[in-house]
Amino acid sequence: MRLLRFVLPFALLAAPASAQFALSDDLRLDVAGGIQPRVGFGVEDGAADDTRYGVGLRRARIQARVLYRDVAGVEYDVEGGSGTIQSVDLFAFANLSDQVQARVGYVPVAQPRGAVLTPYFLIDAVDRATIAERWMAGTLGGDGRDLAVDVTYAAGGTRLTAAVHNGSGSFARDVGNYREGISSPDVVNGPESDGFAVSAAGSVEVGRGVEVGAFASTNSAAPDRTSRAGRDRPRGYSTGGAHVYWGALPGSQPVRLKLDALAIRYFEDGQGNQVTAGTSALAAVRVLGAGEAFGRAEWLWTDAGRDFGLGLDADVAEGFFTAGLSYSPSAARGGPYERARVTLAYHFRASDAFDEAHLVLLQGQLAF
C-alpha cells in the first residue's frame, strides 16, 4: 500500500512526450524534460561516520530545441537539481540529409554506450553503471560532454559518430582551444589545451532487440582530472570499449541482457603507463506486468604499470553489485515505460582501496 501511495502521483502526472509550439511558419519550439526525486540510505564499514541518509533531487532537467523547417536548429538543456541552474548541452545542428546530422557546440561526444549516450531517463537502475561513471570521471568529467564538432550517420539500425573536440571536457573557453579575435594582443598564446581529442563510436542492430557497438578515442589535451593520485601531472590517454545489448531500453521486452567493457590507457608520466579497465553485466526480467526486476555485477581494475591481465596484476580491484525493482505506472496505462517510473535499488561495493559500502536508493521519475 505504501508503494502505491508513492507511485500514484507519478501516474497522475504523466505528461505528453514533449510539447511543441509553432513560433512561425518556419520555426518550431520543442520542449521536453524530466525530474528524479530520490531518497537514500548508505552505510560504509569502517568509516568514522559510517551512515548517511537523505532526500533530494538527482536531476531536474529542461530541454528546449528550436527547429528551422526540420533542417537545422539549436538545442539548449539546463539542469536545476542542485538548486542552481547549470548548462548541460548547448549546440547548433544541421540535418545534412535524412541520415546525416552535424553538430557544433557543447555536446555528448562519442563515448561508451553506457555513459551519457544512454539518456538519464533510460537508465536501467537509479544510476548508470559504475564503470561508466568512473570512465567519465577519469576522462571528460562527470558530464561526459565537450566542446566539439561531430557528424552522425543513422539509418536502418546502424549509427556511426565521429567527433573532433577540445579534450578538456569543459564549457570554459580558457581551458580549451578557443581563439579570440585578431584584435586581441594574445592571438596565439594564452591558456589553452596542449592538444585535442578525436573520438568515434558505432552501433548496429544485428537481430531483434540485439545491438552491438564499440567506441575509441585518443586525447592529447591532458585535462587536470587525469592526474595520477598524489601527482600534479595531467596525462593524455587512449580509450576504447564495446557493448552487446539484448533489449537496450528499460521495459522494452520480457528479458533483457546487457554487457559492457571499457579500458583507458593513460600515457606515460614517468611511472609507466597506467591502465584502467572494467566490465559490467546486467540482467532484467519483466514482473508485475509493468515492472522489471534487475541485477548488475561489475568489476573494475586499475593497473599502475605492470603487465595487465584481467586484473590479475592490478594494483586495485573493485567489485560492484546492484539489484532492484522498477515499476512504471505510465506503462501500466499503455504509455512509455520511462514516462513515469519508480525504482528501488540496493548497491554493494567491495574494494581493495576503499571500505565496503551498502547503499539503498528509492527514486521516482517523470519524463515529458
Image: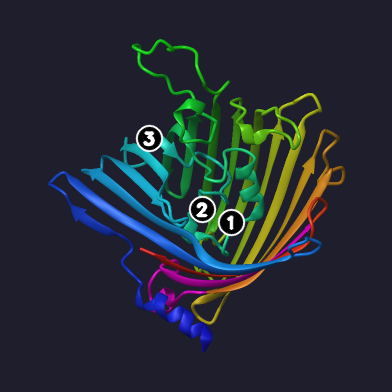
Q: Are marks 2 and 1 in contact (CB under 8 Å)?
A: yes
Local secondary structure at mark 2? loop
Residue sitting at x 50%, y 35%: 170
The residues colored magenta run 327-350
Q: Is residue 360 left or right of residue 105?
A: right
Whether residue 359 is visible: no
- Report the number of discs: 3
Is residue 337 a member of the stretch shown in magenta? Answer: yes
Q: Which residue is mark 3?
A: 102
Q: Which mark is residue 136?
A: none
Q: Which residue is mark 2?
A: 118
Residue sitting at x 59%, y 33%: 217
Local secondary structure at mark 1? loop
CA–CA distance between discs 2 and 3? 20 Å
CA–CA distance between discs 2 and 1? 8 Å
Residue count near mark 1 (Cα–Cα under 10 Å), binned few <14, some 14–19, many ≥20: some
Residue count near mark 2 (Cα–Cα under 10 Å), binned few <14, some 14–19, many ≥20: some
Lower sequence index among marks 3 and 1: 3
Lower sequence index among marks 2 and 3: 3
Q: Which residue is mark 1?
A: 128
Residue sitting at x 71%, y 48%: 278
Dividing the picture into quarters, in which one does residue 293 lie?
A: bottom right
Residue sitting at x 36%, y 72%: 14
Lower sequence index among marks 2 and 1: 2
